[in-house]
Image (cartoon, rainbow, N blue to C red):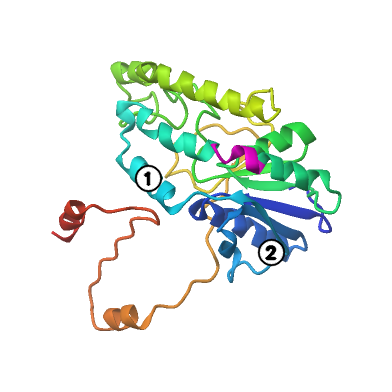
Amino acid sequence: MPVSAEHSWHGTGLKRIYTAPVLEIGRVLAERGHEIEFATLQGQESWVKPDYDFVNKLHQLGPGPTPDQLDGHYRRMQAWDISKGIGQAMGSKYLFDSFWPQTYHRLKEIMEDPATRPDMIVADFFVVAANDIHFEYKLPIAVVCPNMPAFQLPCSYIPGKPGFQLPGTLTSEDTPMWLRMMNEVFFFPDLPAIIRASKWSQKLRSDNGVCYPPHKPSKPDYLILVNSFFGLEIPRDLPPTAAPVGPLLSPTYPPLDPECGAFLATHQSVLYIALGTHIILPHKDAAKIIQ
């Protein structure tokens, strides 16, 4: 990374599940002598304690999403069926894009102050404002993604838009012709919703003095770190700026609580099912798993 040991590194995060890999990168950089500062939305400052006590300073970027907003996002994404288009996911796009103005202006304040201006930003992929800072200030950034970024790093042998392939589509090697065609046209019914979202985003940016489109080239001119690995990801050719680096895991884990410890000590055969941090499991699905 183009950062020397005496320079500062600035991390930004929006959601805990995506921020942990960003902070794990910060842990390694801190061990190498870098100064680590963390910027996040209000109510999320506790993310850095106690596991990430190497963070030297916290920057607030404004109010964060409410519990109801996050609950709606998780339920919406859990019910999303990509084969039926992207209309179901648009509510989440509007939600997270609505935090762009305050994040953008706060990051500009940090950049304009010589006392707080970082030498590099490592940001979660949700933080679109980091791309604007990279574009406006020519500041080196690294964007951390949980998987290969959507709409970026296209390959001739993967049908459709990167990250939005229909079920059953891996590469064109074994994909039927009709499924290849469906991958190219399944966006068409959602064009009205896409156009509305684009106009809304354009107005949001122009109202805040930003007249250029979001900086997101198909082949990025900034570093992308993918918290995954080939095997989970479809193999593809990567430019020098993109690298799979995962899984990024914390070196320490909290001990078992007494109840779980006693349970495991008295059972010989245990099946542990992890559904992720934000799965809201309906009763009927829980019953299926138990059965």
Mark closest to the chain's N terminus, 2 or 1? 2
Q: Is residue 20 left or right of residue 68?
A: right
Image coords of residue 165 (percent x, y): 39, 29
Name the residue at 23% across, 52% down.
282
Residue located beneath label 2 in the image: 55
Q: Which mark is residue 113?
A: none
Taking depth in this image into account, of 21 and 269 the one nearest to the observer is 21
Name the residue at 31% across, 32% down.
167
Residue located beneath label 1 in the image: 72
Residue 187 lies, with reference to residue 26, above or below; the image says above
Distance CA(mark 2)–CA(mark 1): 31 Å
Residue bounds of the magenta highlight: 98-103
Q: Nearer the viewer, mark 2 or mark 1?
A: 1
Which image quadrant is residue 214 in?
A: top right
Q: Is residue 117 magenta?
A: no
Q: Is residue 172 left or right of residue 100?
A: left
Name the residue at 69% across, 34% down.
132
Please report contact status of discs 2 and 1: CB closer than 8 Å, yes or no: no
Residue 177 lies, with reference to residue 269, above or below; the image says above
Inspect this view and state whether residue 235 appears: no
Image coords of residue 156 (percent x, y): 49, 21
Q: Amino acid at mark 2?
A: Val
